[in-house]
Image (cartoon, rainbow, N blue to C red):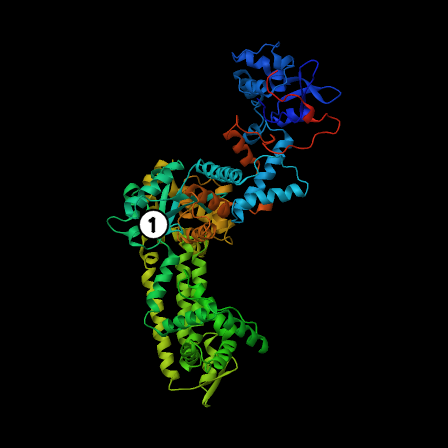
Amino acid sequence: MEGPGQGHDQEVDGNSKKRKTTATTVESWGYDWLHFEKDKEGYVTKLWCCICREHYKNCTAQHTYIHNTDTYITGSTNVKKCTAKTHFESKAHITAWQQSNQAPTTSKTVTQLQKLYNKTETKMCKLFDIAYTVAYTEQPFSLYKTLVSVERKHGVELWFTYHNSKSCRIFIEHIAGSIRDQLQALKKCEPFYCSLLFDGSTDKGTSVKEVISINLIEHGSPTIKLLGIAEPTACNADGIFEAIMEKCADNNIDLSGCLTATAADGAAVNFGKTNGVLTKLQGHVPWMLKVHCIAHRLELCLKDAFKDTYFEQIDDLLMKIYSLYRRSPKKWRELKAIGEELEEHVIKPARSVGTRWIDHRRRAISCLATKNYRSIVTHLQERQDEASPDKEKIRAVLRQLISPKFILHMALYQDLLSDLAELSLNFQGDQLPLSCVRSRILAAQAALRKQTEKPGPYLRPVLESFTTTSEEFAYNDINIRKSNVSAKAFLLSRKNIVDNIIAAIGERFSTFSTDPVLLAAEIFDPINFPTEPNFLEEFGEEEIHHLCKHFEPLLTKNGCNVPEVDKEWFRAKHDIVRHHSRETFLPLWSRFLFEKGRMYPNLLHLIQIVLVFPVSTSQVERQFSVMKRMQGDWRLSLHTSTIEDLLLIKSQGCAPAEYQSDEAVARWWAAGINKRRPNIHPSGQRNPKSPNLPDSSSSPSSSDSE
């Protein structure tokens, strides 16, 4: 029987009937521990195991006896792959290999890689780097083989194995596993506090997936990390709750000893008073706080405030313009030609409805008002008399575009969306402190209230042109004829709209002004510290007492001496006023966690609880966007675990140029220590033989038997 790697590089001497094996064939077997001697013609004459030869005495001490007369210690003249494989799988060799990896000064990563030669390790790291690049750039696994072939074309040595899509998927699995190991390391830090963020959606494969993230402390700062993707057995509160608990159990997280709060969007399945997901979690963890995502709250209050206003007609017109040029390449080409004639840079119209955040409306209205208005009006005026199926639609859009009511409300809409979109973007940040939420809301309400007294930067020039005595006014070099629109009626309508927005924001975010726990957490922000020494003595005492009372079971479980928190808070606030008065919230408490853990060991328990408090689930929404890009129409069969690995690399991985694959390679090697053959030559075409060796075609036999 012909063995792998034999037949082409082996010769049988006709006189002695003895097999001759070349050094290239022995190297292709993939055993790094196998050393050999060869004669002048390049044929191997003797084999031995370098590991057993060096460590056989230690194996004797471990009651696995290896005699110094063993053939693979003295040297075996039976140069056959089957005998080498038998020795590799023997208990004596495994014990000797384990003894060779017990050096106490080496790290875990180095220990796992000790069996790999440096040359082999380097080549495997290159393959892992390519697999990481495929995952990070959201490319299909099939690109991996192409990139490997290009690297080999450039002279990079990558052996001959692990060049297919399956290997890429396996490498990505271990890369994601090494990232998960970092989460497990953070979980071992004491004390450990965390909060959960989750959201659900239906992917392109029509299956419901829940993305679950965790907010914890890393290097003194709150960090959101992906916990996993779960597929609930049912799309109700029970199914989602079981999926969350199962995913936490898979990651060895006991929520009863670390969970402080949970954030989700405002769906009824999440916030149901009797059977919601957060209600079930609160029954499991009584001190847990339920948080409605502030970014979603803002979207809901604006939806209520803009209902039954002229702004709905503006959104409808923006969608008509979007579809008009999106579905007709001819119209888009004509619009660009008109823009070139007018020396304007035309931007493709954006959609304003159906997007998740208010900032998309700002982009759509800004695209029309500041970039495309003149070109679009000119184009529609030229096309309105042409015979086409869209003739009536074009005329209706044009009439609304050049109406003074539309111009005035569009300018007001720009001013309002400018302030509201900025607030929305702030609410979507991953590290927005809890103490800043109420101040941002009050600042946004003040900016909106100011617009009822004084027009904003977009409305001011329009009002100045509109209030002139002439019958027309110019807007973006387009003459707009005044109709029966009254400036006084518009200003009254503006005041009503702004008042409705302010009232809706105040109603939706009322919990940040009434909830005692949320109000108590604001004392840790240095901005809220009193400037007068007399008020500093009693500052925050009631709030500290309320926080300790609410989280007392959790604090006690994590070893906090609750009665000492008051004393440490008294010393800490004087320390902050004297030495850290200019530092902001996150840098201040990150410094305390790093440098002053021994001075305030109990107070810092409360600090960590406040730091991991979630206010927004925007990070989870962004992860759904990444999933949508990854799972295209041609990748609907991806398993949930594979999607989770890809999402983990994309959301928490560094740039491919900065990635170090040593830990992932070590993890991959340790997972299958008896199966890895990084340097074995696969079946198929062999490398050309050395010119000084005889042609294998002259060999009378390539059998595996002597």
Question: Which picture quadrant has residue 6?
Answer: top right
Examine the rendered structure and indicate whether residue 474 appears above or below residue 246.
Answer: below
At which x and y percent is residue 367? 49, 70
Give the SS element for disc 1. Answer: helix
In the image, 191 versus 660, the foreground residue is 660
Question: Which picture quadrant has residue 413?
Answer: bottom left
Query: What is the crowding at mark 1: few (fewer than 14 residues within 10 Å), some, or many (at least 20)?
Result: few
Tell me if 240 is positioned left or right of 224 in this view: left
Residue 131 can be seen in this image: yes
Residue at the left extreme, as displayed: 274
Q: Which residue is mark 1?
A: 542
Q: Quadrant of the N terminus?
A: top right
Which residue corresponds to the image point at 40% horizontal and 65% vertical from the top-left? Answer: 353
Which residue corresponds to the image point at 42% horizontal and 86% vertical from the top-left? Answer: 482
Residue 530 can be seen in this image: no
At which x and y percent is residue 269? 29, 51
Q: Quadrant of the C terminus?
A: top right
Q: Amino acid at mark 1?
A: Glu
At which x and y percent is residue 386? 47, 81
Examine the rendered structure and indicate whether residue 689 appears above or below residue 419.
Answer: above
In the image, 62 versus 95, the foreground residue is 95
